[in-house]
Amino acid sequence: MRNNINVEGILRHLECEKTNNKNKIKKETTLVTKIKPLNFFTRNEININNALYLLEHKRNRFITIRKATKLRINEVDDDIIKETEISKGNEYIMIKYEENEDDNIEGITRFLYNKGEKEYINGVIESYFYIIKTFFQLQKEGVIYYNFSSERMKFKDIYNPHCLLYDFETSLMERRININNTNKSNIIEYFYKFITKSQNFTFKPFEVHVLFYLYKIEEQYLSKYKITQIIEKYVDNMGIILKGQNEKIIKEECHKFMEQFINKNKEEIMIQLISHYKTWDNYSVSILYLHLVENIIQGYKTQMRFMSKFQDILNQNLSQNPNQRMTIETTIEKFNDLFQYWN
């Protein structure tokens, strides 16, 4: 697997901004500096940044890297070494992000906090529409965010529902998991790094939970008994998130999807499950916004017709069977029709 990236040169084209339009006054962007270990995930972040950096409207949707350079330990102040727990035996990289850190509001909970009814509803609807369009933009650039949660959204101010995504260390590059571009063993090896990394599985769909167990078990074939065990663990672990949904129906849906894999080779199952990667961001954002929409329905009892149809879109994208979920593009089209009706 190719990991030998020349980090010193990889972002050379990012060090200076284009100055074609000299007459246009440009607001200075604050650079937030972070020191990180130079490993697979920071290299992954840099590669993804290269795909996003030259996008015309990137600053409205992503927090990107301006500059990344290898760190020479002898040039770093001792206090910084202690603060960041740098050890002299390892390689590190200094990354400068284009971010106004002090101004951003982190997480949709903080963004919606203390808003009145109308502002709260508008904030939920408009931020959802914006974030799914951001995911669509990522997919067009061959990136699956894979890292979404309620805290992965940064808002520029309390009035602007257009949020920024950040932290692409554990995002996926489509060319590395697409069976048309990569052989199966390389896909399995690549995804292993992500599935075994410590992470929050709350916003991950059912098949990603199954993948986690498949990477852990020693059996090479998946029995009906093992499938039942995996489904029981999934429902137990996701109890709080699945609260309010019919547990029996969820289990039946999981079993119906998984029965095709009974006594099948584990690696073949992994490849089939990973192939649903384009639905994962849609699932993640849907599980968050379903709870927000339910809060509106229960708390405000307003816009019920619109919210009911909004729920239908979200629920379809939360199917335990990834084949039943909509693509992001179809979701945008359906929500756009609903949004126009609501306006």
Image (tube, rainbow, N blue to C red):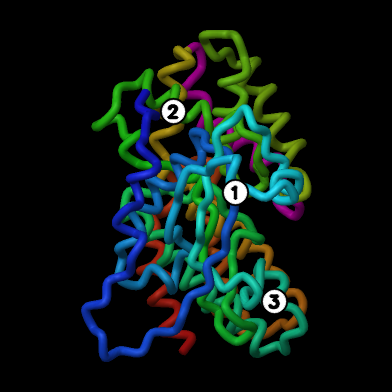
Report helix, strand or loop for mark 1: strand
Q: Earlier in the sequence, mark 2 or mark 1?
A: 1
Judged left or right of residue 322, residue 208 is right
Q: Residue at coordinates 35% horizontally, 37% vertically from top-left?
A: 6
Q: Nearer the viewer, mark 2 or mark 1?
A: 1
Q: Residue at coordinates 36% horizontally, 89% vertically from top-left?
A: 25
The residue identified by callout 2 is 190
Q: What is the crowding at mark 2: few (fewer than 14 residues within 10 Å), some, or many (at least 20)?
A: some
Q: CA distance from mark 2 to mark 1?
A: 25 Å
Q: Nearer the viewer, mark 2 or mark 3?
A: 2
Quadrant of the rendering where the N terminus is positioned: top left
- Residue 281 horizontal/vertical position (percent): 49, 52
Q: CA distance from mark 2 to mark 3?
A: 40 Å
Kind of residue at badge 2: Tyr
- Residue 247 horizontal/vertical position (percent): 72, 42
The residue identified by callout 1 is 35
Q: Which residues are magenta?
A: 243-263
Q: What is the crowding at mark 1: few (fewer than 14 residues within 10 Å), some, or many (at least 20)?
A: some
Q: Is residue 255 magenta?
A: yes
Q: Are marks 2 and 3 in contact (CB under 8 Å)?
A: no
Q: Earlier in the sequence, mark 2 or mark 3?
A: 2
Q: Say above or below: 105 vs 255.
A: below
Report helix, strand or loop for mark 2: helix
As drawn, the label of residue 296 is: 3
Q: Are marks 2 and 1 in contact (CB under 8 Å)?
A: no
How many marks overall? 3
- Residue 22 horizontal/vertical position (percent): 26, 85
Q: Earlier in the sequence, mark 3 or mark 1?
A: 1
Q: Quadrant of residue 92?
A: top right
